[in-house]
Image (cartoon, grey):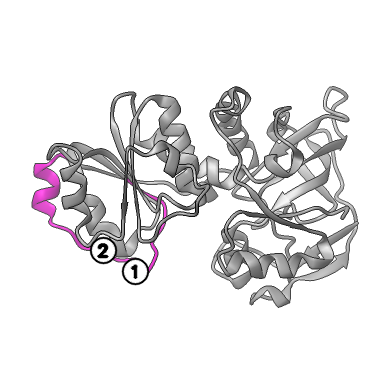
Amino acid sequence: MHAIRFETFGDPSVLKLTEVPAPTVDAATALVRVVAASINPSDVKNVAGAMSQTTLPRIPGRDYAGIVEAGPAEWRGAAVWGTGGDSGFTRDGTHAELLAVPVTSLRRKPDNLSFEQAASVGVNYVAAWCGIEAAGLKAGETIVLIGAGGGVGGAAAQIARRIGARVIGVDRHAPHADAPVHAIAEHLIIGAKDVPAEIRAVTRGNGADVVFDLVGGVVFRSAVNSLALRGRLVEISATGQREVHFDLADFYHNESRLLGVDTLKRDLAASADVLDALTPGFIAGDYRAAPIADTCGLADAAHGYRKVAAGTAGRIVIKPQQ
């Protein structure tokens, strides 16, 4: 089969189109023909050497949608989708014609999603779901999304709306025109110098029940200072700085909670359970996949990686048969 693979870490130029043996399968493993597989920023970071767990040589890629070619009889020919924190890191990933996955990770693709759309859901929605689940967000509560214009921010806004929470978006720059947060957020705070003050101004001085910080690091102090009494702060990133400082007395007097979420700790099977939880929202039309900015074949995958590295709005999707 054909795949893109890297044998050393570096920029996207280290990705090479190569022919490798098709994966072997057993009773616990299914073989999926990949129809579509998106490129995530974490895939770019992986190739660059930012993920310490990655072993080489490696086929990258986390998200996919495809057709089961070999496996249990009830799954053969089924259209499936998936993602995983092990895929592309400690096991060969989705940027290939064929993919071996645990049978326990197989999930049927919602019929109202195309293969390209289904392949664009995984990382963003799994991160959003896990963060909101960790915070225990409830109907009627207020959630602040810092970095609301990004892929995870858009997914989190849609999940929070389905729960019945009030959404406030925060970002340094105005999100692109079709970002979900525009239609969902009651307030959208752009480029504020004092984010906690702005949050309290629109929450009658209370602050947020949940702050989902999608940036981390450089905005951590603003995030923790935006919490209401017994508020929960969820961190999934450490942009700009790994070590942060805050007033510990203020933190415990406010009875604040600090929660970390790492989707890389959820392998293909664990991520499949999250897709189960997300599926009703996609079937109902409450969630939508991010827009597809471009598609490419395996031969042009390195170019697709460069687009993602440059911050292209929308999803770049590899179609191995293209």
Q: Quadrant of residue 141?
A: top left
In the image, what residue occupies the spot 22% across and 62% down? Answer: 193
Q: Quadrant of residue 285?
A: top right
Asked which secondary structure carries label 1, the reply is loop
In the image, what residue occupies the spot 59% across and 62% down? Answer: 312
| Classed neighbour count for the residue bearing mark 1: other residues with Cα under 10 Å, few (<14), some (14–19), many (≥20) | few
Q: In the rendered structure, find residue 241 and report the number of the disc placed on it.
A: 1
From the top left corner, tell me how far across and down residue 233 is, in percent.
Answer: 29, 45
Visible residue check, residue 225: no
135 shown above or below 4: above
Observer-nearest residue: 173 or 106? 173
Residues shaded magenta: 234-255
From the top left corner, tell me how far across and down residue 250 is, in percent.
Answer: 10, 49
- Amino acid type at circle 1 is Gln
Residue highlighted by disc 2: 244
- Give the CA distance from mark 2 to mark 1: 7 Å
In the image, what residue occupies the spot 57% across and 47% down? Answer: 123
User: In this rendering, would 279 be left or right of 254?
Assistant: right
Magenta stretch: dominant secondary structure:
loop
The quadrant of the image that shows the N terminus is bottom right
Visible residue check, residue 131: yes
Asked which secondary structure carries label 2, the reply is loop
